[in-house]
Image (spheres, rainbow, N blue to C red):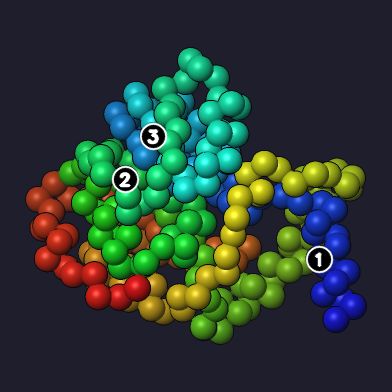
Amino acid sequence: MPLLDALARFNDAHPWSHNAHFHRWIMRQLPSRFDRALDVGCGAGDLARLLATRAREVQGIDSDERITREARESTDPGLPVTFSVADALSYDESGHDVITCVAVLHHLPLTETLVRFRQRLAPGGTLVIVGLTREDTRVQTLLGLVSVPLNLITGWIKNRGRKAPRPVAMTAPTRPADVPYTEFVREARRVLPGVRLRRRLFWRHTLVWKKVRADVDPGRLGTTHG
């Protein structure tokens, strides 16, 4: 359709990262200081570097070797950040005080990944997810429609009306979300009791969960849903 083509051309000429838009919000969910952090799907490393301003040690992991290399090359050697090629299921270290995951969960099996995050988080730690799901409620559809003009305006303002190249963080491979939001909510509440969920503009939702110190072994929850 001509209108959709015009919108796509405008967005391509004035790109901005929807994921980076949530970085400041993510930082507001976290303690002022913490020991170890894990950023899953770290991309170009922007969030990992922010986490390093508060953490003693940050591990950024991404399955894309090219963008992981970009993250290493653009990071000050003095920052306590390490970047590795891995994903949430292949990464084995536990005891993280903070785990973040932005626009990555829909690339992975939902329940198994949530259980893995719960296992990898230290008692008292915080999990923060910004994600994508398939729209299956009226509220989501409405937020998506409202996001269309806001996306155009934000891209214009952030680029000061000029054409701009895509940020490095936006060059990683992507795929559309296929898990419906209602299914995501059901599984998140089952695996992460007390989780805080919220639907957002710009086709995103957010999740915040704090692990209680007397947490039940998440292996007992099972991983029956993908």
Residue that carries the numbered disc 1 in the rendered image: 8
The circle on residue 66 is none
Question: x, y percentage for residue 71?
Answer: 56, 33
Q: How far is mark 3 from mark 2, CA to CA?
A: 10 Å
Q: Residue furthest top?
A: 78
Task: Please tell me whether residue 121 is drawn above or below residue 53 in the rendered image.
Answer: below
Q: Position of residue 15 (x, y in %)?
A: 76, 51
**10 Å neighbourhood of mark 1: few (<14), some, or many (≥20)?**
few
Q: Residues within 10 Å of mark 2 (few under 14, many from 20)?
A: some
Q: Amino acid at mark 1?
A: Ala
The tag earlier along the polypeptide, 1 or 2, is 1
Secondary structure type for disc 2:
loop
Give the amino acid type for the residue marked by disc 3 in the picture. Gln
Name the residue beneath numbered marker 3.
59
Estimate the x, y position of residue 145 in percent, counting from the top left.
69, 75
Q: Is residue 12 above or below residue 62?
A: below
Q: Which residue is mark 2?
A: 91
Total numbered labels: 3
Residue 118 percent across, percent down from the top left: 24, 54
User: Mark 3 against mark 2, which lies toward the viewer?
Assistant: 2
- Dot 2 amino acid type: Tyr
Considering only vertical position in the picture, is 72 above or below 201? above
Point out the tag, 3 or 2, that comes first from the N-terminus. 3
Residue found at x 47% / y 20%: 79
User: Residue at (47%, 65%) from the top-left corner?
Assistant: 106
* Picture layout, residue 55 above or below residue 104: above
Quarter of the image for residue 84 reads: top left
Q: CA distance from mark 1 to mark 2?
A: 36 Å
Q: Nearer the viewer, mark 1 or mark 2?
A: 2
Q: Helix or strand or loop: what does disc 3 sit on?
A: strand
